[in-house]
Image (tube, rainbow, N blue to C red):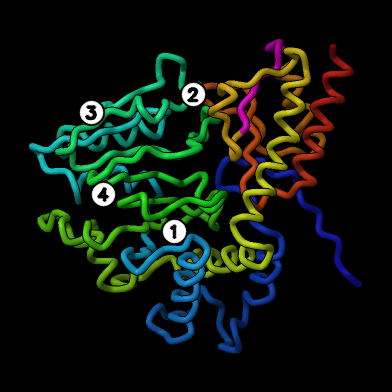
Amino acid sequence: MKQTVNRAYNFNAGPSALPLEVLQKAQQELVDFRGSGMSVMELSHRSATYEEVHNEAIARLRELLAISEDYEVLFLQGGGSLQFSMVPMNFLQPEQKAAYVMTGSWSEKALAEAKQFGQPYEAVSSKESNYRYIPKLDEVRFDPSDAYVHLTSNNTIYGTQWKEFPNTGNVPLIADMSSDILSKRIDVNQFGLIYAGAQKNLGPSGVTVVIIRKDLLEKANKNIPTMLKYSTYAKNNSLYNTPPTFAIYLLGEVLGWVKEIGGIDEIARRNEEKAKLIYDAIDTSNGFYYGHAEAGSRSLMNITFRVKDEELEKQFLAEAKKEGFVGLNGHRSVGGCRASTYNAVPYEACKALSQFMVEFQAKNS
């Protein structure tokens, strides 16, 4: 008899939902992985069994994102926040400038870290509108001599997302894709470096993916600590020290799940469909609900909105929690409501939320 699994409607912004199929497979393999008599967590990272897991994850990511051999795929730790420092540490000299596109709190944090190493500046900012929109491509100003251009592809707190990216020519484009990597098709060749914490679309927390063009590795600062050099990980297949083996195993299984259901194009179709359910509930509410992000900049990953009355908003969140909806409170810095609809959040959860929103409005209008 098939066991019924009680799953919450998980809209957490991260760590976020993982595919049920992946969790169930991990459960089955937890104690005895591939006949080894050990859990993945117990395997030596130098063993052939773990090396297969490691290389499978890299190969699956290369296939799904069409990553060419001009790029290295690295597994690091420290989340996106460590990358805020590692990027300028490797690529920004004290006398150099770098352009930072400001679209939210994570952009601000990245810029603050870069100021410790060189002369970064704001290329363009939407802060004056409380980050309600993504700047137009022709508003992104930078100099050909800049070390790089940095942007955040999706803004979890404000609910905005880049639909296309600026052409930066010979200046490397570096993107923090922590909250929307693998959610839609991108051209990796447009970027010098992409980094992403795994805990939203790729897997559990604890591993960070870096996709870096090989020519940049050759230009990187060599006078920094070994563990903060991208070249250290590239030369050692991300096995210089003990990596987060279980997180990488789960990442590989999530990538396998994406491939099995139809790849990135299918994931993108599902994400459009899921987000539309919730945006439609907002847009047809005649102002009962209203979104934070401007329509042309709306994120498919993080849907941010308010209820017209503060007391009603509190009631909405309290009743939603009772109905099994988890993680709908907006970020503590902006308040309101937020539904994070990452790849593994099922259509049924988004449909249930949309229906709840319609019913709540009907009862309280």
Q: Position of residue 24 (x, y in %)?
A: 71, 67
157 within the magenta span: no
Give the quadrant of residue 335.
top right
Q: Position of residue 68 (x, y in %)?
A: 38, 66
Taking the view exactly as shown, the residue that stands out farthest to the left is: 95
- Residue at image position (41%, 56%) is 208
Lateral position of residue 14 relative to residue 341, left or right:
left
Q: Secondary structure at mark 1?
A: loop
Mark 2 lies on residue: 133
Compared to residue 8, the image places residue 151 above or below, namely: above
Q: Which mark is residue 121?
A: 3
- Residue at image position (34%, 33%) is 109
Which amino acid, by three-letter code, is at mark 3? Tyr
Mark 1 lies on residue: 207
Which amino acid, by three-letter code, is at mark 1? Val
The mark that comes first in sequence, 2 or 3, is 3
Q: Nearer the viewer, mark 4 or mark 3?
A: 3
